[in-house]
Amino acid sequence: MTADGRMWRCGRYALVLDRPLVMGIVNITPDSFSDGGTFLDPVAALRHGHALAAAGADLVDVGGESTRPGSDEVPADEELARVLPVVEALALGLDIPVSVDTRHPAVARACVEVGASVVNDVSGFRDAGMIEVAAGCDAGLVVMHMLGEPKTMQAEPRYDDVVAEVRRYLAAHAAMLEGAGVAADRICVDPGIGFGKTTEHNLEIIRLLPELAELGYPLLVGASRKRFIGEITGESEPARRLGGSVAAALAAIARGASVVRVHDVAETVQALRVWQAIGGETW
Ligand code: HH2
C-alpha cells in the first residue's frame, strides 16, 4: 500500500501536497556544517524557528546532532537537552508542524510527547526502537537513505546503480513501518543527498527523482548548501551556496519532490512563487 501522494498526515496536521512545501532548518548544534554554533542558544534557536515560519516555511525541522560526514554520534541525553525545550516552545507557538531530526528513539519519543508532528530519521528507521516510536504515535515520518554511518559514509561510497539501490532501501524501510502498523499516508521518503554519495551520485539521484516518486510516497529532498554544490561551483563556504541550493531545490521539485529541506527559506519561497506563477514545469 502506498499513499496517494496528495496528503501527508503529520500528527494534528494534514499537509496538502498540491504545491511544493518548504521545510526550514533549525540546527541546535555546535558543529553543523553550515551554521554550527549559530543557534546553539535555545533563545536564538526559538527566534530562528519563528523567523523561518514568518519567511514562509511550511514546516520547521529541529536537530540537535550534526550528521555531516565524519561527525561523531551525540549521546541521546545531550541531544535531548538541546532540542526538547525548543521543540516544545515551537510546537506551542507556531501553527505549522514542528519536525525533530533524530536517530534516537528516546529523543523522538520525548519530542512527540511535547508536540513534534514529524520524526525525521536520517538513518531511515533502521533502529527497532525508532519503529516502535513511529508505531506508537501519529506523527509524520521522514524515511531517509544513508549508506553506513555519518562517521564513514563518505569514504569511497560505491553503488552498482545508486537510484535502484536507494529506491529498494526506501521501499523496504517504508514497508517495515507499514508492517508495524504505520499508515502509508504518514510516510515521506528522502534519498539522502550527501549521505554516502559522491557528487555524481547526488546528481544522478536528482536527475532520476521521478523513479523514486514512483514509490508513491511524498518525496523530500535536502540539498541545501551541501558539499556537491561546492564541488560543482568552487564555492567553499557553505553559507554562500544559496544560488546553487535554490537551483537544486527547483530541479528536485520539477522532478517530483513534494518537500524541500532548506536553510534559506525566504529565498526558496520566493523562487517557488515565481516558478509556480510561470506554471512550473514537471518532468
Ligand atoms: N540533511 C541533513 C540533516 N538532516 N534530513 C533529511 N530528511 N534530509 C536531509 O537531506 C538532511 C537531513 C544535513 O544538513 P544540516 O542539518 O544542515 O547539517 P548537519 O547535519 O551538519 O547539522
Image (spheres, grey):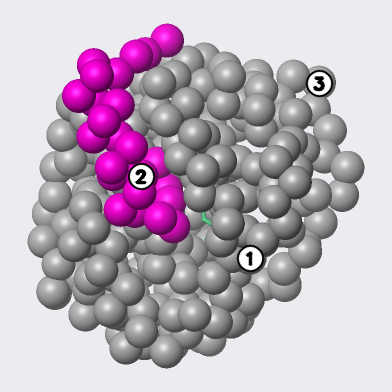
Highlighted magenta segment, given as a residue range: 260-283
SS class, disc 3: loop
The outermost residue toward the top is 283
> Can residue 139 be spotted in the picture?
no
Question: In the structure shown, which secondary structural element does the residue marked by tag 2 occupy?
Answer: helix
Q: Which residue is mark 3?
A: 160
The amino acid pointed to by label 2 is: Thr
Quarter of the image holding residue 25? bottom left
Q: Amino acid at mark 1?
A: Phe
Q: Residue at x 72, y 37 (%)?
A: 232
Looking at the rendered image, the disc whose residue lies closer to the viewer, 3 or 1, is: 1
Q: Percent x, y for residue 276?
A: 24, 25
Can you tell which mark lies on residue 2?
none
Instruction: Point out which mark residue 268 bears.
Output: 2
Dot 1 falls on a residue whose secondary structure is loop
Q: Is residue 97 left or right of residue 239?
A: left
Residue 96, x across and y down, in percent: 17, 57
Residue 162 is a magenta residue: no
Q: Residues within 10 Å of mark 1 (few under 14, many from 20)?
A: many
Residue 255 point in image, percent of width and height = 44, 19
Q: Report how far apart the C-alphas of labels 3 and 1 lie in the structure.
A: 29 Å
Label number found at residue 33? 1
